[in-house]
Image (cartoon, grey):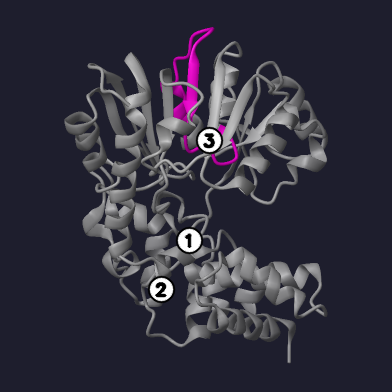
Amino acid sequence: MTRWENYMNAAEKVITGYDGSLPLHHYLKTFFKAHPHMGSRDRKWVQQLVYQYYRLGCWQKERPVQERILLGAFLSSQGPDELLAFFNQEWNQQAAATLEQKLALTGIAWDAKAAFPFLDHLSAGIDGEAFTRSHLQQPHLFIRARPGKKAAILRLLDAAGVPAQQIAEHTLALPNGTKTDSIIADKSWYEVQDLSSQETGLRFQPKAGEHWWDCCAASGGKSILLFDKEPNIHLFASDVRASILENLKKRFAEAGLKNYSSKVLDLTSHALRAQMPRTRFAGIILDAPCSGSGTWGRTPENICYFKEAQIAEYAMLQKNIAANVTPFLQPGGTLVYITCSVFREENEEAVEFLRGHCGLEIAESGVISGYERGADTMFVAVGRKIKTIEA
């Protein structure tokens, strides 16, 4: 049996054994640990085939697994490779063709609704056809150069032979798989952060001396972006997960950030006020827990395992959190509401809730489209407190 057949069999074994209860990359680590005979090249090929299978979403699910793996490999390919050549020479010769040409060669019509069953929930302005097709390609690796470090970073990347495309003033796009930590030794020089995520920071307008609260801080990427815009703020960071805040502290230490406090908080708790260090903030970043549907180009397995009912569950959670945190916004203060979702229930409907129930005047809201730029798709709204609501 050839190594290409072995790769295909291993990929099928992963797919048939996977149930979606773990992120796919965690499951793959477990699988490879149980198969120690597979070398790094073998693991890379198998992982690629598995992800290419899931990039088809729910489209053509009735096909045998190995047929669908090969179809995903062909439609996702950027050029010829040995595996395609082994299984289908004609497809391999057209591996660099456009998606339309590839579909014509297969004789199969693309069905956006079948690929992404949640199209009816998309936020306004998202092109469903283009969005679903974008999942066939892995989004780029983006880094944000921290103030004053871009030129030095570009020199290191150039010396390492890594092509870097400058997207914005501080944003660089790198080839996926680039080992940034082995090229740029000083982690305080940059942050790995998606392009659309970086663009949410354009809505941050902190002033020196102000108190800001990153209330769903996770590992702190938005907080670091906030600090880079204005180092002389007082930051309070919270998250419901203690382990995540430990990651934040480590990331802040690497970034050289010290002027902050942090605390584990349940933002749905009725006792939230008693646990807060202060009752008024000039700015609140609410990077809300969400479906993550705008990031599924990076985790395409979610398309197959996400349940439609979860959209309403996330929307309810977001409104609950918004209702609890907005009373801590001082009159005239700013709330920046962010999701990495493409669903209107988590986006536009959340904005209506902020306007109608939280005493906010909405200055801006809309989708940050990433699906045609090799990036995640996100949503951001900026609200300002127009009346005092007691916490």
Q: Please, what is the three-letter code of the amino acid marked with disc 3?
A: Ser
Query: Which residue is at 28% across, 30% downward?
Result: 365
Q: Nearer the viewer, residue 272 or 119?
A: 272
Q: Nearer the viewer, residue 169 or 283?
A: 283
**Residue 213 among those drawn in magenta:** yes
Query: Which residue is at 62% across, 82% downward?
Result: 8
Question: Which residue was labeled with disc 2?
Answer: 105
Q: Which disc, if any, is residue 238?
A: 3
Rendering coords of residue 241 (x, y %): 56, 48
Q: In the rendered structure, which disc, 2 or 3, sits on the residue that comes first in sequence? A: 2
Q: Quadrant of the N terminus?
A: bottom right
Q: Real-space Cα distance between discs 2 and 1? A: 10 Å
Against 69, is 387 above or below? above
Q: Are marks 2 and 1 in contact (CB under 8 Å)?
A: yes
Q: Are marks 2 and 3 in contact (CB under 8 Å)?
A: no
Query: Which residue is at 29% across, 42% downward?
Result: 319
